[in-house]
Amino acid sequence: ERLVLTAEELEARERIVAATVRRIRELELSLEEIERPARAAAARRACEAPAADAPAGDGPAAEVRATGARAAGPPAAGAPRPAARWTFEAGPADDLGALGGILEGGAAVAGGRLRLDGRGAFARSDPLPRDLREKTLEAWVSLASLDQRGGGVISVESRDGRRFDAIAFAERQARRWMAGSDLFRRTKDLEAPAETAAATELVHVAVVYGSDDRIAFYRNGVPHGKPYVPQAEESSLQTYRRGEAQVLFGLRHTGSTNGLLAGEIEEARVYDRALSNDEVAASFRAGPLLVGDREIDEALGAAERERRAALIGEIRAEREKLRALPPVPRAYAASPAEPGPTFVLARGDVEKKGEPVAAGVLSAVAGPPADFGLPDGAPEGQRRLAFAEWVAHPENPLTARVLANRLWQHHFGRGLVGTPSDFGSNGERPSHPDLLDWLATELVARGWSVKAIHRAIVLSSTYRQGSAHGGAARALAADAEDRLLWRFPLRRLEAEAVRDAMLRLSGQLDLRMGGPSFRPFTVTVSGSNFYHLLDDPAGPELDRRTVYRMGVHSGKDPLLDSLDCPDPSTRTPVRSVTTTPIQALGLMNDAFVLRQARALARRLEREAGPLHGDQVRLGYRLALGRLPAPEEAARAEALAREHGLEQVSWAILNSSELLFVR
């Protein structure tokens, strides 16, 4: 996942982002100066009024920031005391004890909140100083978006990351809370409504793990869904040992791919016991008060209200600028690093390093020196260049032999060495070793000209032989596989060549070079699954050479597949050649073949005129490179008169003479 932008482009983008974020922070500080005394006044009035379980306020400020405020005065009666509490007033550390905290990935503490970007920011505590078994996790959180998936608000996990219990948002169900756990062992989807809080509105969430294995979830001090007992072999109540566990904020668990939360945490608490319903409600009332826009506006003068509204508008506009920035494009590509020293490993054990080894190749290969002669610490570019020069060195016989053998295989269907990717002791011995060496030598002598070797092969008497073996019974008995090439091997065209040949004959072949692949399938998306359907696609955009065809596992072409077209995801140095009824049926009935037969008939009518005899002769000449014999012409003309020229075209496309190289 390398960045596609250049360093200059990335630097320019980061300058824009940094300036916008800095401006947002300045505006937020100005807004905080106006709202702080108003929130305090509203909180004092709220303490004097009956407590409410629902959050207040859904005005314009909710789009910009939550409006929580800590009540002045004593906590609500019956409020439990947590084992650890984080108010984020001065940093990420615990307020009640000596449990330190560490900010990671760009997380920040500002305005009495832990701010999380959902991309890499989270916080973690020091190791817990006590065992934790029966427990309650609690937090006041504002979500940046209800459409995020899988973020953790607060989590307690073993430090090896193998076990965790968390308050998670929308991991398995969109916009729904749940008690997250390792491999969902202690997780059950709650029968509770989806979250509807406005963006950044403060929400209270808590989960209680009781000694009876029951897990209960709460939202804003009241039960959220029914308590449940997980269906697991082990107890749902995990023990986190002293010094072997930590608390995470904004991350579901270490190593999770989608466990980061986007939003802000106003306060978080961990209890070393299971709270009752009344205690959760009391804790909620004793936490940050949910003061809304209306209460703040009522505590402000007219000028302050106007200034506050202007600041909210500016913050909204600046954040819109950030959202409008296009994401940084990334590419799946190599992320190179300079290689470190290489050592001989005793018995292959990476922990038992022996003597250092210089950059080079296998000394068992005869030819140019195996040692590249590079100094220690030579950069990767020099090593690659040295290896490339060794591969193409005139004294290296392997490269020229392999390439010459592949060229021979291209023309005869089988190389002089029948295992083109294995010239070692497990591979096949060459049938004509002197010829292979001569071709390799000529390849090097002619400046690695592939065209020169092609010309030498196709002008040879071996290539110009016929494939018939009538009267050669002795040769057939001695060499039935034709390894000694006493005749030209009968060879069927590759599947791609069959398709291209039909398109060329029908006049439909698009010979444009380069550009994107054509897609002979339609894509259907269902949830997170993609389905590729071959719905007999047709059209000019699909008439390109088959080499430009995009292939997918779930959308194979049945005609090409039956003709032994290999899966593009596997290496196929030598294609298998089979003969099956499916091939004949496909050539007879495949919609592609029938379309090309119709197009070929139209071409013959257009170019040869109305006479069936002229049409048949042109068809034979285009497809087979010859004119029909008198009996062939008579049969084809009769078929055209009785059933139409399309049937003649169909028969030509199904002829063995078209499909086989002789």
Image: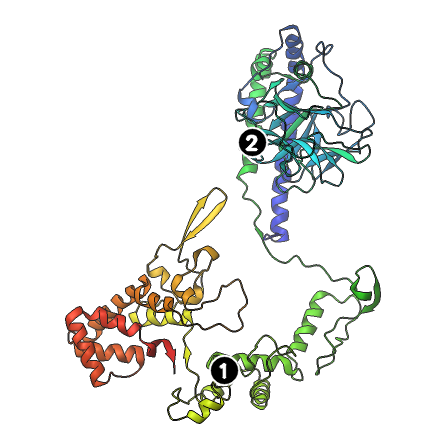
Amino acid tagged 2: Ser
Q: Earlier in the sequence, mark 2 or mark 1?
A: 2
Q: Is residue 594 left or right of residue 405?
A: left
Above/below status of 280 relative to 339: above
Above/below status of 287 relative to 612: above
Q: Residues within 10 Å of mark 1 (few under 14, many from 20)?
A: few
Circle 2 — which element?
A: loop
Most foreground residue, 301 or 170: 170
Amino acid tagged 1: Lys
**Which quadrant is home to the C terminus?**
bottom left
Q: Position of residue 364 (x, y in %)?
A: 73, 79
Q: State the residue at coordinates (44%, 62%).
A: 515
- Separation of marks 2 and 1 at Cα, in angstroms: 61 Å
Q: Position of residue 537 (x, y in %)?
A: 35, 57
Q: Which residue in the protein does label 1 denote?
A: 451
Most foreground residue, 77 or 64: 77
Q: Which image quadrant for residue 559?
A: bottom left
Circle 1 — which element?
A: helix
Most foreground residue, 226 or 496: 226
Above/below status of 438 relative to 49: below
Q: Residues within 10 Å of mark 2 (few under 14, many from 20)?
A: some
Residue 224 at least partly seen: yes
Q: Is residue 50 left or right of residue 85?
A: left
Q: Which of the numbered marks, if any, corresponds to residue 145?
A: 2
Q: Position of residue 102 (x, y in %)?
A: 76, 35
Q: State the residue at coordinates (23%, 70%).
A: 647
Q: Position of residue 349 (x, y in %)?
A: 80, 62
